[in-house]
Image (spheres, helix red, strand yellow):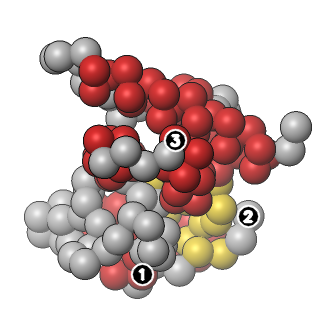
Amino acid sequence: MDKQEAIYRTALQLVDHFSDCLQTAGRGVHSRIFSHLLNPEQEFVAIGQSQEVIDGAPSHVEHIVPCAVLIKESCELIKNGEPREEIAKLMAKHWKIAYISKEQAKNLDTKDGLNLKNTMPKGWDYKTGDTKARLNEAKIVLMPL
């Protein structure tokens, strides 16, 4: 099985898990679930690193679309009756990580910076939006691994 197929099949499992959680009152989904299902995650979904990391800055693993967004948007689509296969395709599309510097992560995540730790930029759409929109907003350019 190739990597893309593994990501898609794992995304299908996540959609089913999210559906089960939605049907069980009080049962939430922890965002760390993504890090545990594809192991090691970076071998499947890592797509690049910033020049700062290449130049030796301390690195931080960043989910390009925050896990909280992947969960929230997928659950909304489940509630709206979208086919699980379509939700899994979207999740597989946006489930990516990159290595950025700790300073870049601080700017991306904190209130003193862009405050995008658990959100995407205003107007971003799960179905049509650019996976790298948060990084683009922070002017973080990724170099291929």
Mark 1 and mark 3 residues within 8 Å of each other at the beta carbon: no
Q: Alpha-carbon neighbours of circle 1 within 10 Å: few (<14), some, or many (≥20)?
A: few
Q: Mark 2 or mark 3: which comes first in sequence?
A: 3
Residue 46 got which mark?
none
Residue position marked by numbered label 2 in the rendering? 145
Q: Alpha-carbon neighbours of circle 3 within 10 Å: few (<14), some, or many (≥20)?
A: some
Amino acid type at circle 1 is Asn
The quadrant the C terminus occupies is: bottom right
Amino acid type at circle 2 is Leu
Residue position marked by numbered label 1 in the rendering? 136
In depth, the one of 41 and 85 nearer the eye is: 85
Residue position marked by numbered label 3 in the rendering? 84
In depth, the one of 34 and 16 nearer the eye is: 16
Amino acid type at circle 3 is Arg
Instruction: Classify residue 140 as left or right of residue 143.
Output: left
Q: Residue at x 49, y 69 (%)?
A: 131
Look at the picture and state if 104 lies above or below 136. above
Q: Mark 1 or mark 3: which comes first in sequence?
A: 3
Q: Residue at x 54, y 52 (%)?
A: 86
Q: Position of residue 107 (x, y in %)?
A: 27, 69
Residue 85 appears in which quarter of the rendering? top right
Does residue 102 appear anywhere in the picture?
no
Q: Position of residue 90 (x, y in %)?
A: 52, 56
